[in-house]
Image (cartoon, coloured by chain):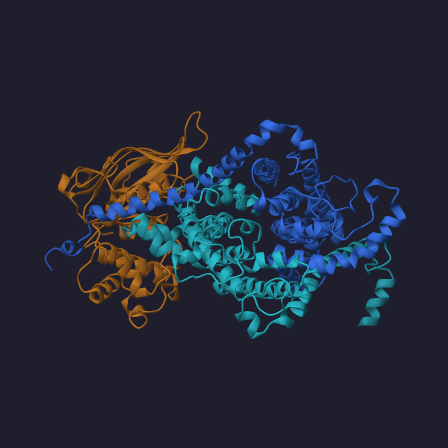
Chain colours: A orange, B blue, C cyan
Amino acid sequence: MTTLQQPQATESHNTDVALSLQNVTISYGNFEAVKNVYCEIPRGKVTAFIGPSGCGKSTVLRSLNRMNDLIEGCSLKGSILFGGVDLYGAKIDPVEVRRRIGMVFQQPNPFPKSIYENIAFGARINGYTGDMDELVERSLRQAAVWDECKDKLNESGYSLSGGQQQRLCIARTIAIQPEVILMDEPCSALDPISTLKIEETMHELKKSFTIVIVTHNMQQAVRVSDMTAFFNAEAVEGGTGKVGYLVEFNDTDKIFNAPQQQATQDYVSGRFG
Amino acid sequence: MSDPDSRYLLRSRPPAEKLVDISFRNLAIAMASVVAIVLFSILVVVFQGSLDSMARYGWQFLVTSDWNPVDDQYGAGAAIYGTLITSLLALMIAVPLGVGTAIFITENIIPKRIRDVIGLMVELLAAIPSVVLGLWAIFVMEPFIRPGLELLYQLFNWFPLFSTPPMGPGTIPAVLILVVMILPIITAISRDCLNQVPPQLRQAAYGVGTTRWGAIINVILPAAISGIIGGVMLALGRAMGETMAVTMIIGNSNNFSVSLLAPGNTIAAMLANQFGEADGSQVSSLMYAAFVLIVLTLAVNIFAQWIVKRLSLKY
Amino acid sequence: MTHTLSQNLSGSGPDLSYRPFLRRNIGSGVLSLIAAIFAVIAVLPLVLVLGYVIVQGGSKISLALLTQLPPPPGLEDGGIANAIVGTLVVTAIAGLIAIPVGVGGGVFLAEYSRSGWFAQFIRFGTNVLAGVPSIIAGVFIYGTIVTSRILFGNAYSAVAGGMALAVLMLPTVIKTTDEGLKLVPDDLRRAALGVGASRFVTIIRITLPAAFTPIATGVVLAVARAAGETAPLIFTALFSPFWSDLLTPEGIFSPIATLSVMIYNFAIEPYEFHNELAWAASFVLVVMILALNLFSRWLARFAAK
């Protein structure tokens, strides 16, 4: 297996860090979903969050562009720094956060509009002034779905297959030119061929964007990511549910071949639970 | 291209956009508050309007039935009694009819196509304006049932409820038209509740070898009963507040009579009849009666909501 | 085949044939019959009422009836034209008030606060308001708007009538909007917010359009119901035997005729021609309302496709 020789990303300088999680604890009401996460997500790389279900990896991902604001009773302690700014600071507008940190969701969720409008919608609300036709084409090409779409840009986004819809959603996110793209199990609803295409797309995208992806598929993490964070959950004393925490964060290669923690070793070798 | 970001002018949101966002939210809150304001104002307006009459007649107002604008003497006992008796009698007739119809159109006794037509017709019945039903009641229904009422009087005039000769408008015709009005509510809500019973329950019942009606009576109805009771309570509230059809057929008599064949009155009918021409203490007394009607319907409606919430936790 | 089968049934195998005179089967049949009779009784009033409205009212429809004013009591020449216009005007006023307020309130409940205490309180209030008798809405508007002459010194008016109807429409519109928006998958909301749309843009451009049909269906039903209401109008919009001058503001600030109040007034008058006008007005009103109902049904079915 080829090893991407990266300088110690975990200890990298601030300029190479896209997002920095400082002692992040996220709760739903009184129930803590994930606790005490420290993590520095490098710029221009693909970082994967893996772990068993209920370990809070998706919760952490959604907190990175304040998507959790939509869930009533969800609160966050600690801080998430983006370019040195705390995303949860008092004066931060979550809408602006999401314009810089885009997101692709688990289920393909195109708008009930034409393919063209699906792309143009986000660009327009971001005040895009360039040539819209060109932007639509470029975004769809980057997301590797242009060939399937070019003849039916005015048809509904729902006329595409599931895998194509998901790539449309990726194109939609690219079109707003965010700095970071978050992907929440983007392939979980797709067939293997579509999954492969999305993974190829991601290899292209990491040239221009920082990508954070949650996946329950360890092979996918190995295939697409440079860095991997392994989350686990454990029952707490006196608590009712399990609390997630970050076990280990390192180069993907190290996580899968030479993990530091026994829990990681068990999980990646399939001896989990 | 130099900096891709430079073409996204609104990357940082201008204050105007934020203002629109916040204003819209506040507008939505304001619109939602209108409900509370209207509800509260209704209570205040009616309560304030009735203060005079409350001070003058107190509780006596509720049990005396002397309603005489000439002597300036008011008691709403007859109207309150009429409101209760008409709606309860209507309920007694409409509940079996409505629930029976709902069962008939949710079970596959006859082809779905015909059941759907019946369901549609019952729903359309709900759409017919009450004033049209009143017109029909005056000119068609009442003349049609009068011979029956005559017979009732001749056979049972020793019995207080049928002790006066029918004169046309009266309590029984009002009850019948109320049945027509609340039947669609009971049927529609019962049908929805029966449809929502999980199919597994029915399969379980059939699985142990019951007949269709065994399953309906022992399994399906009990599972749907909370919603059906809620619907019945809503219908009761509707019946108590129903105005036009009742006004047109009940006879609007201010005198109390225990006989169902005699003309009667309800609070709503009294309001419709007298409010426009009333002044002075009559307005206040009508407001007092309106307040009683609000309290009655509120109690029934809140009870309905409570019972649905309470009983629906069971399955 | 059949021969051996029946032999088998009467022979050694278990007897599984349907025996209609078994007690449980008789009971089941009787109950089914009762339910069927109930269903027929439930449908009967619609058939009878519609039948009479069509026969008594439909037969009197003529161009004169649809274009002329009602005659003075005792005379026999005229129509219901002003009431038709009046019903449209008063219902439109009610819609103009209740639809924006109701949709706004519904947006708050579904989009901004699903489970907050204030939202719960408003939902409860909406249910309570929906249960308020229609005559009370009339009393309320009479007590606040009519007697105070707050509308530029006018007492009874089309606007007051429209406001009373709006009170009745409001809960339906709020509930419909609330429930329609709840049907919009959260995926769509997240998609819009994920590309950096504000709540305002998300609601206006994505969720409200996505929920358009269920909301429209409910709103049409609310309008239909309001168009047939009488009780709230008797002492708010009152009645008028004349045309309302709708080209000037005085028109909507003065008493106005409506079909429903016309039916009420003319039904209890002793003049036969006025009774006939009441039937004709019923026909027009019922046709309008049933058309709206069928339209909303069509909308719902259209959406399902």
Residue C230 location, x and y as percent? 57, 53
> Residue placed farthest to the bottom in the image?
C63
Q: Nearer the viewer, residue A18 or A224?
A: A18
Residue at 49% from the left image edge and 47% from the top image edge: C167
Residue at 84% from the left image edge and 63% from the top image edge: C9
- On screen, residue B67 versus residue C81, left or right, reads right
Residue B231 in sight:
no
> Residue placed farthest to the left in the image?
B2
Give above or below for A118 relative to A67. below
Residue C140 location, x and y as percent? 51, 42
Q: Nearer the viewer, residue C20 or A47?
A: C20
Give above or below for A83 relative to A179. above
Residue B261 in sight:
yes
Q: Nearer the viewer, residue B49 or A99?
A: B49
Residue B39 location, x and y as percent? 49, 39
- On screen, residue C154 versus residue A88, left or right, reads right
> Residue placed farthest to the top in the image?
A238
Quarter the C terminus of chain A occupies: top left
How many discs appear?
0
- On screen, residue C227 versus residue C188, left or right, reads right
Residue A264 location, x and y as percent? 33, 38
Quarter holding residue A234? top left
Give above or below for C59 relative to C244. below
